[in-house]
Image (cartoon, rainbow, N blue to C red):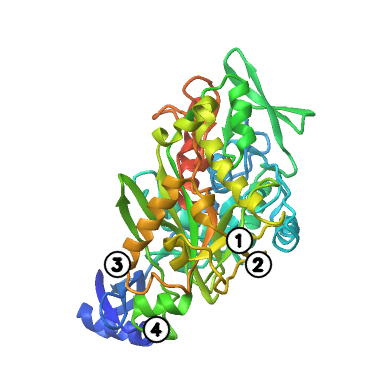
Amino acid sequence: MIKQVELKLLPAEAADEALVRQRAIQKSRFPEKDVKEVAIARRSIDARGQRPLIILRVDVYAGESYQPEPALLNKLKPVDEAPAVIIIGAGPAGYFAALELIELGLKPILFDRGKDVRTRRRDLRAIQQFGQVNPHSNYCFGEGGAGTYSDGKLYTRSHKRGNIYKAMKLLVEHGASSDILIDAHPHIGSNKLPNIVANIRETILHYGGEVHFDSHVTDFILEAGRMQGVLVNDATEHRAGAVVLATGHSARDIYYLLHRRGIRIEAKPYALGVRIEHPQPLIDRIQYHQSPREEHLPASSYRLACQVDGRGVFSFCMCPGGLVVPAATAPGEIVINGMSMSRRDSAFANSGTVVAVELEDLLPFQDQGVFAGLAFQQQVEQAMFNFGDGSQKAPAQRLTDFVKGKLSASLAPTSYIPGLLSAPLQELLPPAIYQRLRLGVQEFGRKMKGYYTEEANVIATESRTSSPIRIPRNVDSYMHVEVAGLFPAGEGAGYAGGIISAAMDGQNVARAVARFLQ
């Protein structure tokens, strides 16, 4: 017999396995001699009271033992001689599509414009230390995609889009901590993700798939309205029965290529703004009512949202104990993102703070047609770069000066390695974006006492929250609405918004490919 009980414990108590077992057995009312196993099924934090509590849902097994599920990887069989499917992009959508294809008996052949995850680190160092942006290998492009360096936050609300547990379990089987299966807001950490990503690649190769780096798809092979393959590096043709397009939200050249080839794409709403960085102890004091926080509490986080003049203003990709990093994908632009290591032990907390950009906001760029949103995005990123000194130093203001529209005489300490420049963001940001952000952060300060402080920096620009382009596909077949054999997937296609939602979308697309080829 299995009974699930809920425990509310202090952090130190929740960290004591013997005490958790004792309390769970007591609450289950099973005789202790009959209990075979006690296993935590869910863990979350309740910080609403004066002292944070850890909420545990615990399964107590009496008269029977816990039976672990068989490994998902045990289902895989070699696909060396199986029909091939081309996947463009080795991010979460691409890699999880590849694993799913192998399970379905198809051979994935992946092409990624960037480098393998280990070699990619050199290009990240170059942009951090020297401001040198490699347009094919950076924080967005390369093995694992942008997800490799975004903390590994795995929370998603997309429960209806696919099998979240399967995606999580595959991550565990490739080296992630099993804690991600029980935590309400799981994360892995950007220091651990590279090994996990490399392990996924090894699985793909072991079962007969192929993974090719430094392989930039420069054209599509279209015949009689059907996608037949790709041209790589302007030199080599590769053909297959289907092509999965999983290039991420920043592969602008792919959108232009689709347009040139007459393949339908659409403008879509997205969001744009800044990243706001606070001292982590300040956020802990606000959220946990204590600083320093207790030993067994993780760095605290927040999620904030409000409406300003008919547009949503909201926090995005919050990184407790994290770092702000340069995420440009081409020279001449400033783009930033956030990430955390597994321990989330940085002295800083940062979060994207963005404004919804709707299609009617893009009227000044209507001459750009479907690329209006992309042109708007680029203009802001380039304005930030042009203000600076030609490096990856990012324009910034103290939060209080940002609200007042005042140039900061000095800036607060930051985790951003290239450095910050005091800048008039009220002039560099589009007026409607700035005004809504200005009013939005004041509202956030009312909701979260202590948030509005001169100790925080506002850093520009957070502009890659999602793609301004959608590649339309049929709801049931997941195939492009006009081109047979082309399967848009993940964030770059406009159908995902994070590691797990992109992974699930890749899995869904892989199953659709299998149906199409059969």
Using the rendered view, name the quadrant where residue 46 is placed: bottom left
Report helix, strand or loop for mark 4.
Answer: helix
Using the rendered view, name the quadrant where residue 216 is placed: top right
CA distance separating discs 1 and 2: 7 Å
Residue drawn 69% across the image and 55% down it: 117
Report helix, strand or loop for mark 3.
Answer: helix
Q: Earlier in the sequence, mark 4 or mark 2?
A: 4
Where does residue 23 sit, x and y in percent of width and height?
Answer: 27, 84
CB-based contact (under 8 Å), mark 4 and mark 2: no
Label 4 vs label 2, nearer the camera:
2
Q: Is residue 196 left or right of residue 39?
A: right
Label 3 Cα crowd, 10 Å radius (few <14 / some 14-19 / many 20+): few
- Amino acid beneath label 2: Ile
Where does residue 116 sit, x and y in percent of width and height?
Answer: 71, 52
CB-based contact (under 8 Å), mark 3 and mark 4: no
Where does residue 453 sit, x and y in percent of width and height?
Answer: 42, 72
The quarter in which the N terminus is drawn is bottom left
Labelled disc at residue 17: 4
Label 4 Cα crowd, 10 Å radius (few <14 / some 14-19 / many 20+): few
The residue that disc 1 covers is: 325
- Amino acid beneath label 3: Arg
The residue that disc 3 covers is: 446
Label 2 vs label 3, nearer the camera:
3
**Measured along the vertical axis of the image, is residue 108 above or below residue 421?**
above
The residue that disc 2 covers is: 417
